[in-house]
Amino acid sequence: MKRFLILIDDIWDTKEWDYLHMCFQGIKNGSRIILTTRLSKVAQYAKCESKSNPHDLPLLRDDESWKLLQKKVFHGDNCPSELGDVGFRIAKSCGGLPLFIVLVAGVLKEKNNKANLWKEVEQSLDALNIGSLEESMSIIGFSYMNLPHHLKPCFLYFGGFLRGKSIHVSKLTRLWLAEGFVLENKEKGLEDVAQDFLKNLISRNLVMDMEKRFNGKLKMCRVHDLLHKFCLVKAKQENFLL
């Protein structure tokens, strides 16, 4: 029998691992399964099938965090000198977690490179706790609170889709229109306004563009699993989705 290498990404529950690994029992021909998870209990549970210890990915160093933040905010352009010190402190406050750095970059891009606004972001981040999965929701909430009012329901609506699945943009925008999230615009049609809403969420790093059509328009999108979890929790708190 041929050997295989299988990557199973982002497992959240030990039951999911039970269902998956049952399909590969009895195969001892040098094949390998690589499992990724954010939960140490899942990694330790899956370890019983392996002689290898779970590998913990290291956090980014402060200089690596600052480099990533600059890349996401300035897209290759140089960071203005007056933003260097505060920007480095902001990057450091993200605790070396790439997802949080990217989310904070999405907020900073809307601050028009003004040092006083960046310092306000720094002060807000200092009040947040970054550590466990539950505490991680606070920095996602920080990005959410910095959204314009009209984009908040559009973002929370992603909680109504299956976690980890790509979403057809045409379906998503039609649903936004049906829900009344998109108001008429004298300059653009409703479909174009909905597309602009989605592009705004993507520019803030809250939504990922997964696939484009041949004409360059977005075809598929999705949200990160942690952001999907936030949408579910926040939507329940606000009686937004049932």
Image: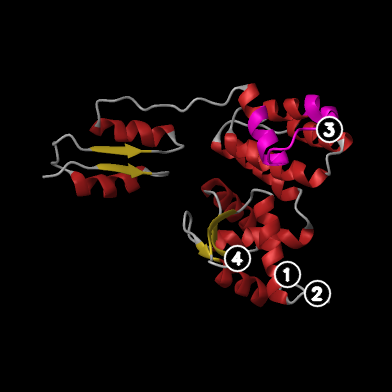
Q: CA distance from mark 4 to mark 3?
A: 36 Å
Q: Quadrant of residue 60?
A: top right
Between label 1 and label 3, give the one nearer the viewer: 1
| Mark found first going from the N terminus, 1 or 4 | 1
Q: From the viewer's perspective, is 74 left or right of 167?
A: right
Label 2: how many Cα within 10 Å (few below 14, some 14–19, many 20+): few
Amino acid identity at mark 1 = Val
Q: Which residue is mark 2?
A: 185
Against 109, residue 156 (above or below) is below
* Mark 1 Cα-neighbour bin, 10 Å: few <14, some 14–19, many ≥20: some
Query: Is mark 1 in CB contact (under 8 Å) with mark 3?
Result: no
Marks 2 & 4, CB-CB < 8 Å contact = no
Q: Is residue 71 magenta?
A: yes
Residue occupied by mark 3 = 119
Count of picture labels: 4
Whole-angstrom CA distance, mark 1 to mark 4, is 14 Å
Q: CA distance from mark 2 to mark 1?
A: 7 Å
Question: Label 2 sits on what residue type?
Answer: Asn
Q: Of helix, strand and loop, which mostly describes the magenta segment?
A: helix
Q: Residues within 10 Å of mark 4 (few under 14, many from 20)?
A: few
Magenta stretch: includes residue 223: no
Residue 138 visible (yes or no) = no
Q: Which residues are magenta?
A: 66-86
